[in-house]
Image: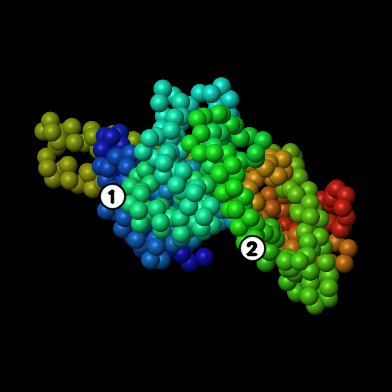
């Protein structure tokens, strides 16, 4: 697949002291891009730059501009730590690339989001990271109601009309009269915007100096603190939308405080605003259908879920399947979304052998480089000691220099081949491990995350009369590794001991394990047990 990418090179001063050359990183990334058939359009160099904060660096901004403008559609780098060491910046980079539809390729970690396997891997990792963040947030939030019930402060600003004094809420002498006036005006005019306008015209302002708005008026009218009942632990923040939402009322905690208006006035205002809210037409959230756009009838027509129906329906032949049934079938098939133990063992054995061949070659080349470098050092020492003249040094060093250059090109190329094999095979090992537990985690994943995983692995779903056919882009149990081309190995170049360095023959640059798989199962409400068959 033709693709235009950039190469990211960041080698700090400390890295250079340890002998890490920017050119080596460049050659390795370029060799990988060449093996994949990609065009390298840009090289972004941040040499001697620390990875603690790189987002604001001019080269990083140039790279992001090229991504957004579509000049490059992917970025290749040697490892994630080279992109950035700051976790927050790594997440920001990943989010930008995902929003722009661009790919990240980390050679060391064997991650390539240009492949279905890489996209699935990132999707599942992101889903698990979100889940873990929510688990941590829940544990932290669990301490809030306990402190509230004990009457201890739980943080946050005091409601308008009150202030904190000795860890207790007491009426604020300047704000409390405005809070009372607010309720009285609403009882009289029954319009939040009218109340806000009158308060602003009379010179009243919120605590931060802003003008009152209808939203502020609504919030203060419904806050029971003014009648002497402070409410705590009743809101939460949605990490995805960054908006506030109410917790279940069973989790709310109330503590008594000094009232600043009568309970009758508060109840009257609350009744008015509640009636107004109920009279307004509710805005329902659009349901996220997991298989929308992917579900087809056996006749070839796309099936949709009408707003007034709980079923996927073909409008041509009226074929139907309940949404709940199709989701249950898909969930059950996740059990078989992995290799058998025997297949995993065979698969990893083949993968290890393929990697071992290239790693042995890399080790051989590195040993050869050390030998040739030692020869060059000895030759230089002889020249410095006057044992050979300048012409003798030049004639002898010419051959050594050529071999060092050849090794300098060959080592990154071999490393790139190892990267390609690892990304094609070992990243799938991670997916297998994650997929083995996907069935259990599935009900706990947010709906949006479930949809992303479906998009990553499902090509189409066909509803026939009495059976469901699920075609998968990626199916770990549907194929084996590509077979090497016949012919064994081909010679590369001579070594110092007279032998030849050999390269495994038949290297497939864009090796892919993403063969389509097909699941066919009978339509039933009971557990589906049909095996996954190779497509």
Quadrant where the C terminus sits is bottom right
Q: How far apart in space, not on screen, are marks 2 and 1 (Cα)?
A: 49 Å
Image position of 368 (left or right of 264): left
Give how far across and how far down residue 47 sits, in percent: 27, 45
Disc number placed over residue 375 in the picture, else none? none
Mark 2 or mark 1: which comes first in sequence? 1
Residue at the disc numbered 1: 57
- Confirm whether residue 430 shows in the render: no
Taking depth in this image into account, of 350 and 512 the one nearest to the observer is: 512
Give how far across and how far down residue 457 sits, in percent: 65, 56
Task: Please tell me whether residue 316 is drawn above or below residue 334 in the rendered image.
Answer: below
Residue at (26% x, 38% y) in the render? 13
Taking depth in this image into account, of 388 and 253 the one nearest to the observer is: 253
Are there few (<14), some (14-19), or many (20+) residues within 10 Å of tag 2?
few
Residue at the disc numbered 2: 281
Task: Please tell me whether residue 318 is drawn above or below residue 350 in the rendered image.
Answer: below
Image position of 127 (left or right of 220): right
């Amino acid at each position: 697949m033709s693709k235009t990418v950039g190469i990211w090179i960041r080698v700090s001063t400390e890295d250079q002291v340890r002998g890490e050359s920017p050119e080596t990183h460049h050659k390795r990334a370029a060799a990988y891009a060449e093996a994949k058939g990609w065009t390298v359009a840009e090289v972004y160099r941040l040499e001697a730059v620390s990875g603690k904060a790189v987002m604001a660096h001019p080269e990083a901004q140039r790279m992001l501009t090229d991504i957004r403008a579509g000049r490059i559609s992917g970025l290749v780098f040697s490892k994630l730590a080279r992109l950035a060491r700051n976790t927050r910046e790594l997440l920001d980079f990943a989010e930008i690339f995902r929003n722009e539809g661009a790919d990240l390729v980390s050679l060391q970690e064997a991650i390539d989001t240009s492949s279905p396997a890489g996209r699935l891997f990132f999707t599942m990792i992101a889903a698990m990271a979100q889940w873990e963040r929510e688990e941590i947030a829940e544990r932290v939030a669990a301490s809030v109601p306990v402190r509230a019930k004990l009457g201890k402060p739980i943080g946050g600003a005091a409601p308008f009309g009150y202030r904190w004094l000795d860890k207790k809420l007491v009426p604020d002498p300047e704000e409390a009269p405005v809070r009372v006036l607010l309720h009285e005006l609403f009882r009289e005019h029954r319009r939040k915007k009218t109340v806000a306008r009158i308060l602003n015209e009379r010179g009243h302002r919120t605590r931060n100096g802003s003008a009152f708005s209808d939203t502020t008026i609504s919030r203060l009218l419904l806050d029971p603190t003014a009648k002497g009942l402070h409410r705590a632990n009743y809101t939460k923040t949605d990490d995805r939308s960054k908006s506030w939402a109410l917790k279940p009322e069973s989790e709310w905690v109330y503590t008594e405080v000094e009232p600043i208006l009568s309970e009758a006035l508060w109840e009257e205002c609350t009744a008015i605003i509640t009636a107004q809210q109920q009279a307004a037409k509710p805005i329902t959230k659009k349901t996220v259908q997991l298989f929308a756009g992917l579900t087809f009838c056996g006749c070839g027509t796309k099936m949709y879920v009408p707003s007034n129906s709980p079923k996927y329906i073909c409008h041509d032949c009226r074929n139907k399947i309940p949404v709940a049934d199709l989701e249950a079938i898909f969930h059950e098939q996740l059990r078989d979304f992995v290799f058998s133990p025997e297949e995993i063992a065979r698969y990893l054995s083949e993968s290890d052998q393929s990697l071992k061949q290239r790693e042995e070659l890399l080790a051989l080349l590195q040993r050869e480089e050390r030998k040739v470098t030692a020869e060059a050092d000895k030759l230089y020492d002889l020249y410095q000691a006057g044992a050979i003249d300048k012409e003798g040094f030049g004639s002898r060093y010419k051959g050594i220099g050529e071999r060092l250059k050849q090794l300098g090109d060959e080592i990154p190329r071999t490393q790139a081949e190892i990267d390609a094999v690892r990304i094609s095979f070992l990243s799938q090992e991670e997916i297998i491990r994650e997929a083995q537990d996907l069935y259990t985690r599935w009900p706990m994943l947010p709906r949006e995350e479930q949809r992303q995983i479906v998009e990553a692995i499902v090509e189409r779903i066909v509803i026939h009369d009495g059976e469901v056919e699920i075609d998968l882009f990626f199916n770990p149990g549907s194929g084996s590794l590509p077979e090497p081309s016949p012919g064994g190995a081909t010679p590369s170049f001579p070594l110092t001991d007279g032998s030849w360095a050999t390269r495994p023959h038949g290297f497939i640059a864009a090796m892919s394990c993403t063969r389509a798989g097909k699941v066919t199962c009978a339509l039933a409400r009971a557990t589906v047990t049909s095996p996954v068959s190779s497509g």
